Image: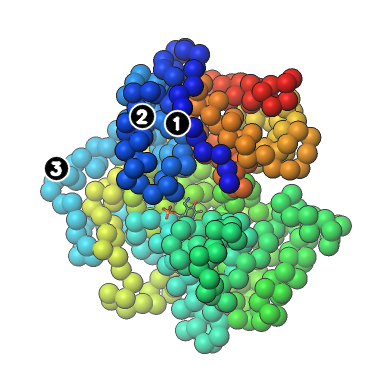
Amino acid sequence: MAKSFEMEPRKTTRFETKYRKICTDIPVPESMPIIEKLRKYEPRSMSGQPLIIWDRADNYNVYDKYGNKFVDFSSGVLVANAGHSNPEIKKAAIDMLDHGLLHNYCFPSEIRADLIEKLIEVTPAYLEKAFLLTTGSETTECAIKLMRTHGQRFYSPTKLKIVTFENDFHGRTMGAQMAGGSKGGKAWIVHHDPDIVQVPYPNAFLYDWADEKNPNYSDDNCFDTWMGFLKEACGGKLEDIAGFMPESYQGGWVQLMPKGFVERLRKFCDETGALLTFDEVQAGFGRTGQLFTYMHYGVEADIVCCGKGISSSLPLSAVLGRSKIMDMYGPNEMTSTHTGNPVCAAAALANIKYIVDNKLVERSASLEAIIRPALEAIQKDYPVINRVNGAGAGWGVIFTKENSKEYDPDFAHDVTRAAIERGVMLFAPVGPGCTIKVCPPLTIDEEALKEGLAAFREAVEVTYAEYYGK
Ligand code: PMP
């Protein structure tokens, strides 16, 4: 199990710059009663993040109430794409509160109409309808339902297999977790649906099989090797596949799929009637320099799952898809109590307008020129980084033992702590605990970004010195 963040305050070096300030020990001794209250009343599962009390957040800064100020590289788990407390989003939410509609269930509302119209307007033309939900998990559950229904209704009663990719993440509700997650995390399910099957992620770095079974591995030919795994997973019944649901990039590693692979997967779907859903809950709304990350692959999606950056703030998610798929269920057969909550919908609409009007997708692409070289330079200087993965403003740094391929979650944990002590906000490492995500709001000031990256480098440097005495 990965290390947890210790309750014992540690001495810090006090400093203040334009973008960051550390003026207390961390965790802040005065904040301990709040942390203890959380520990007392929340399940232990909620105690995994660094022990900084988030008091307020503004654009790319997070503040506690004890005077500390952080440059945010977490975007609050990739939500605040348009910046925290974006004034236009805030105004839209306040206006809706003042207007006096806090809830409307599935009754028609103008704000829901405006939001889904905007969503369909800014996304590719073949995505014709949008169904609003609240969390990312609900969207992947919904996609599974739609893919299965589609296979059964338009092809055959046995066309119901859902194919997902090992180590992808789709959420923590039952269907979502069955479809993704680590194998260990799924033990509680016991009665795993035999028609939800996993295949390896198509990438030579993550899977030695690509080298072993296909010495001529390349991005373009890995599909053929992978097809062997698909046949095995489906008992040879490829015609029974209702749909595939990859994460557009694998969040645990910030790993994109080879373009050639996705092109062949799309072709396979077209030939067999399987649907292709991209889980864009994390990767969407500009994170990697395209509106949706799957657009890097140059293919069409049948269904897209959205969440997080869709509002940059309040809880709202959406399933987008072709009408033929989205209209399969009749009135009141596919709904949710909080669908398109008016305040959340107002926030999401303002967010999408902000992203488009301020060209944040293009800005995300351009931030790559700052983030990639800074992280690659750290990798070059410290032989504890196996890979730097990502695109646009979505990056992952994967830590291993020195000059080794063995992942090192403890080292990644200690880098995270050291970065926090230097005023850089990171969430706990992901994947098997060895990937630190560098994912600032797309609105981040370039100087603040550079300063944060320099502080992150320092965190690696001190941790390396601590572990290896160099
Ligand atoms: N899919 C992906 C790719 C995600 O990253 C997440 C959340 N991390 C989810 C689904 C689940 O979203 P939620 O936590 O909102 O249910």
Task: Please state which of residues 39 and 89 is positioned toward the viewer in this rendering.
Answer: 39
Q: Name the residue beneath numbered marker 3.
A: 98
User: What residue is at 41 percent from the left and 17 percent from the top?
Assistant: 24
Image coordinates of residue 325 in percent, x first then y, are 44, 73
Task: Single out the mark in the foreground, 1 or 3.
Answer: 1
Find numbered disc 2 in the image and state the secondary structure of the residue it sits on.
helix
Picture quadrant where residue 358 is located: top left
Quick one: label 2 or label 3, which is nearer the N terminus?
2
Distance from disc 1 to disc 2, alpha carbons, whole Å, reads 8 Å
User: What residue is at 57 percent from the left and 77 percent from the top?
Assistant: 194
Q: Which amino acid type corresponds to the residue marked 1 in the rendered image?
A: Met
The local crowd at label 2, few if under 14, some if 14 to 19, many if 20 or more residues have their Cα within 10 Å, is: some
Asked if ligand 1 lies within 8 A of label 2, the reply is no
Image coordinates of residue 344 in percent, x first then y, are 28, 49
Distance from disc 1 to disc 3, alpha carbons, whole Å, reads 41 Å
Task: Please state which of residues 408 and 85 is positioned toward the viewer in this rendering.
Answer: 408
Q: Is residue 198 visible?
A: yes
Q: Name the residue beneath numbered marker 1.
A: 7
Distance from disc 2 to disc 3, alpha carbons, whole Å, reads 36 Å
Quick one: label 1 or label 3, which is nearer the N terminus?
1
Q: Name the residue beneath numbered marker 2.
A: 32
- The image quadrant where one finds the C terminus is top right
